[in-house]
Amino acid sequence: MSFQKKSKCLLIILFSFLILFTAACSDQATSSASQSKSAPKEIRLGYQVSPSAELLAKASGLLEKKYPDIKINWIQFDSGRDVNTAIASGSIDFGLVGTPPAAIGIAKGLPYKVFYVHDVIGDSEALVVKKSSGIKTLKDLKGKKIATTFTSTSHFSLLGALKKEGINPEKEKITILDMQPPDIYAAWKRNDIDGAYIWQPTQDKLIREGGNVIVTSGDLVKKGVVTAEVGIVHKDFLKKYPDIVKGYISVLNEAVGDYRTKPEQSAQLLSKELGISPAESLKTMRQMIWLDGSQQKKYFGESGQTGELAKVLKDTGDFMVTQKAIPSSPDLKTFQQALLSDLYK
């Protein structure tokens, strides 16, 4: 082969390699851009210190393990109403709220969707009264001071319990005070209140310091007063990163599975978050009905049917109107549309 032919062949080979190299770089750049678009730099989670799968996932570092290249920012809140405020301001992407704050948030048109039912609340929330108060039944609350966190599941349960007994708080001069859990504990120690309807771990602290349980949310479920804790996600985050939402659901499912298969080990991890002993932690965990992904359909609905959660939120919203927490409660369809039921087909 002549020198000219050899040079020509070499140029063709080099040109072909250049085209392939350029295409490969282009594909890699497209892939990187796609990954960048489908994964945020940071995930901001508004959590509460409640014995839930979310708190266990935090304690276990499950989300950090799933997304090692994403900054996971856990932000603690004392109540669902504070989580609602954070979602409204755009300062968090995910949050945990009870059904009353969720109903209020949907009624107010806050920019979020409900994506998960963490648990149905049982004995983990209760009315605890001082032994020295002489209170034995709900009827003995006349003239007493009872604290709770307004627009929370505990507030809803307290008012629901009184309603079921035909007790009018105003008529019976029952003073219901709005306090966050830390303030309730401080007021209890100062003897400023006679009792409190509150969740764990504050509930357990009150019991240890001379408290008796009068009624629990588990008792009220049997009477039709249902409360639950749900996961919410900001609509903007959902639109940008739907796969991350699905990934977080898988993390929550993993946490529920760990609790069911390794309860003692899970309680050990959760005790550090709750600030109580592992034995007390396990007790509080068992006071909630934890749900995984396979149990979500009945709450979110399927095949065009309304889910149980939408009905609970509608009933809760209607009740919140009577308490003047919101001016009006939307229709059932609006509550159903606020649920990410497509995730559980």
Image (tube, rainbow, N blue to C red):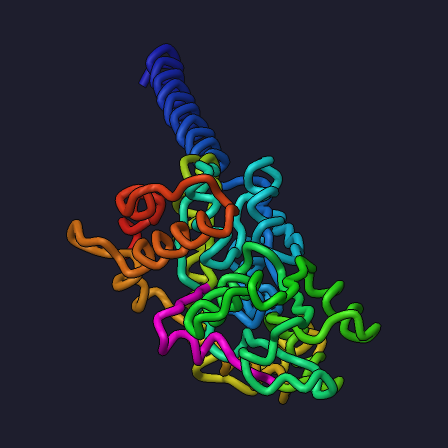
- Report the label total: 0
**Camera-side residue: 344 or 289?**
289
Vertical relation: 174 (above or below) 17: below
- Name which residue lies at 61% across and 43% down: 86
Was residue 219 drawn as part of the magenta stretch in this picture?
yes
Rendering coords of residue 56 (x, y %): 56, 70
Report if residue 258 is visible in the image.
no
> Considering the image in quadrants, where does the C terminus appear?
bottom left
Residue at 67% from the left image edge and 72% from the top image edge: 144
Front residue of 144/246: it is: 144
In terms of depth relative to the viewer, which is nearer, 122 or 113? 122
Question: Could you tell me residue 320's position as x and y percent?
Answer: 46, 51
Residue 46, x across and y down, in percent: 59, 52
1 with respect to 146 (left or right): left
From this viewpoint, which residue is outermost toward the left? 303
Q: Nearer the viewer, residue 215 or 142?
A: 142
Tell me where the magenta segment starts and ends, as one range.
Answer: 213-228
Q: Is residue 188 left or right of residue 330?
A: right
Q: Is residue 25 above or below residue 8?
A: below
Q: Residue furthest front?
A: 171
Give percent across and percent down for residue 338.
35, 44
Q: Give the quadrant of residue 330.
A: top left
Residue that extends furthest to the top in the rendered view of this protein: 4
Q: Residue at x 58, y 68 (%)?
A: 172
Residue for point 27% across, 49% down: 342
Instruction: Tell me: residue 244, above or below residue 109.
Output: below
Viewer can see residue 126: yes
- Of the 4 image quadrants, the one containing the N terminus is top left
Residue 226: say if magenta.
Answer: yes
